[in-house]
């Protein structure tokens, strides 16, 4: 199991948390997703044989937030 913490801009409320956690959590191989609004981070635990960091970033981008 791999873990990555991404810095994400544009998240400001509970809806943002649900949107990001929901969409990233749907990816095959993602075990857990935790958004920290105060820190502006998204921590993802995933299986690298099933999903890549680029795919995770793409899902966050699709929700309208920017990975920096």
Image (cartoon, rainbow, N blue to C red):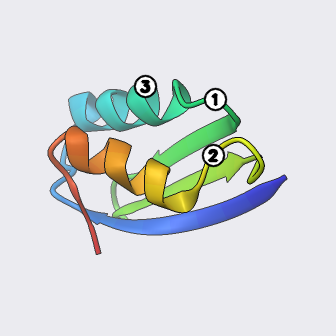
Residue for point 46% across, 60% down: 54
Q: Which mark is residue 51?
A: 2
Tell me the element at label 1: loop
Residue placed most toward the observer, 41 or 47: 47
Work out which quarter of the rendered image holds the C terminus and state it: bottom left
Q: Residue 25 falls in which quadrant of the image?
A: top right
Q: Earlier along the polypeptide chain: callout 3 or callout 1? A: 3
46 sits to left or right of 21 = right
Q: Are marks 3 and 1 in contact (CB under 8 Å)?
A: no
Q: Which mark is residue 28?
A: 1
> How many residues crowd mark 2 within 10 Å: few (<14), some (14–19), many (20+)?
some
25 sits to left or right of 19 = right
Residue placed most toward the observer, 50 or 17: 50
Q: Which residue is mark 3?
A: 22
Where does residue 36 sit, x and y in percent of width and height? Answer: 44, 54
> How many residues crowd mark 1 within 10 Å: few (<14), some (14–19), many (20+)?
few
> How many residues crowd mark 3 within 10 Å: few (<14), some (14–19), many (20+)?
some
Q: Are marks 1 and 2 in contact (CB under 8 Å)?
A: yes
Residue for point 63% across, 46% down: 51
Q: Residue 31 falls in which quadrant of the image?
A: top right
């Amino acid at each position: 199991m791999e873990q990555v913490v991404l810095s994400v801009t544009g998240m400001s409320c509970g809806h943002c948390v649900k949107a990001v956690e929901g969409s990233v959590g749907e990816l095959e191989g993602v075990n857990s997703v935790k958004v920290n609004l105060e820190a502006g981070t998204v921590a993802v635990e995933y299986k690298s044989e099933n999903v890549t960091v680029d795919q995770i970033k793409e899902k966050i981008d699709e929700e309208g937030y920017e990975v920096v």
